[in-house]
């Protein structure tokens, strides 16, 4: 598709059409501090993209602006060919953007299964949660996801008794059962054992190809295991993009982040 999409700044149809997520000239400021200054950032449909960078590089702000939690001062943001620049976060979520924060946000007093029930599409409203009953196919889906993340034996366990790794998997599972098109996953390997880290990487790799996934991460071994394209942010800007080997060898990245 040729031409441009009207607006300020102009955006090429090809950029919007070929990317599940596309940002053009997006700037975010907090009290005069420029937290994000993205000239161009795109993630293809069903791609697993990893975003790395030092503390304060703008990684979380990038997720915030895609999900609508933070507002851009200028520029344009597109999700699945729809401009979301000025949409509320709830409206963006309804389009299919799901978010997993660094600290797992599960309900401690509910069982693993009850947490999954709550995350079912359409179950966030009060009345469906009070009176709704999951259909057999929804139950089957919950069971299948929990089996995949090795939580099936903890089905009736309250979330408060789960390990940190299990809580991470539960929140990712809640994200999956909600059926988003995009998963924004913030530091999924933080605080995990080596075994748990490997299992988390395997889970994300399984989801690649059926979901668009943006992972924020610091653990370079974890990033290498995920493979695929890496975007390096520094001071709110895209510093480099490429494979983990390519960005690891970039002198600018070495100086700004890797320190190797």
Image (cartoon, helix red, strand yellow):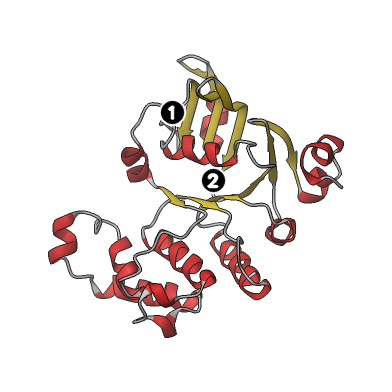
Q: Nearer the viewer, residue 210 or 151?
A: 151
Q: Secondary structure at mark 2?
A: loop
Residue 206 occupies which quadrant of the picture? bottom right
Q: Nearer the viewer, residue 19 or 33?
A: 33
Question: Who comes first in sequence, dot 1 or dot 2?
Answer: 2
Point out which mark residue 15 bears: none
| Residue name at image x 71 percent, y 62 percent | 225
Measuring from the top left, give residue 35's x and y in whole percent.
Answer: 57, 29
Give the residue number, with chain letter if any, for mark 2.
45
Q: Quadrant of the N terminus?
A: top right
Measuring from the top left, give residue 66's x and y in whole percent.
Answer: 47, 37
Q: Secondary structure at mark 1?
A: loop
Q: Please, is residue 127 above or below residue 147 in the view?
A: above
Q: CA distance from mark 1 to mark 2?
A: 24 Å
Determine contact: label 1, label 2, CB under 8 Å. Answer: no
The answer to whether residue 1 is seen in the rendering is: no
Horizontal relation, residue 238 to residue 125: left or right: right
Give the residue number, with chain letter if any, for mark 1.
71
Q: Nearer the viewer, residue 49 or 153?
A: 153
| Residue name at image x 52 percent, y 18 percent | 4
* Residue reaching furthest to the bottom: 153
Horizontal relation, residue 126 to residue 159: left or right: left
The answer to whether residue 68 is seen in the rendering is: yes
Horizontal relation, residue 249 to residue 55: left or right: right
| Residue name at image x 41 percent, y 36 percent | 68
Residue 142 occupies which quadrant of the picture? bottom left
Measuring from the top left, give residue 64's x and y in whole percent.
Answer: 48, 38
């Amino acid at each position: 598709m040729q031409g441009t999409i009207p607006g300020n700044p102009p955006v090429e149809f090809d950029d919007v059409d070929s990317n599940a997520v596309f940002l053009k000239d997006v700037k975010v400021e907090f009290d005069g501090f420029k937290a994000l200054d993205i000239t161009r950032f795109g993630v293809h449909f069903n791609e697993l993209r990893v975003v790395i960078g030092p503390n304060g590089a703008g990684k979380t702000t990038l997720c915030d602006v895609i999900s609508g939690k933070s507002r851009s001062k200028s520029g344009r943001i597109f999700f699945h060919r729809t401009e979301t620049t000025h949409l509320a976060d709830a409206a963006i979520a309804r389009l299919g953007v799901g978010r997993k924060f660094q600290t797992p946000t599960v309900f401690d007093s509910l069982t693993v299964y009850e947490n999954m029930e709550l995350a079912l599409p359409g179950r966030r409203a009060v009345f469906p949660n009070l009176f709704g009953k999951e259909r057999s196919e929804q139950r089957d889906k919950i069971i299948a996801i929990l089996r995949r993340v090795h939580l099936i034996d903890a089905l009736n366990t309250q979330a408060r008794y789960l390990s940190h790794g299990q809580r991470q998997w539960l929140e990712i599972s809640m994200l999956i059962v909600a059926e988003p098109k995009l998963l924004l996953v913030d530091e999924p390997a933080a605080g995990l054992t080596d075994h748990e880290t490997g299992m988390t990487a395997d889970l994300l790799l399984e989801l690649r190809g059926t979901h668009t996934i943006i992972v924020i991460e610091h653990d370079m071994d974890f990033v290498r295991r995920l493979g695929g394209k890496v975007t390096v942010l520094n001071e709110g800007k895209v510093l480099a993009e490429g494979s983990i080997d390519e960005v690891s060898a970039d002198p600018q990245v070495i100086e700004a982040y890797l320190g190797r």
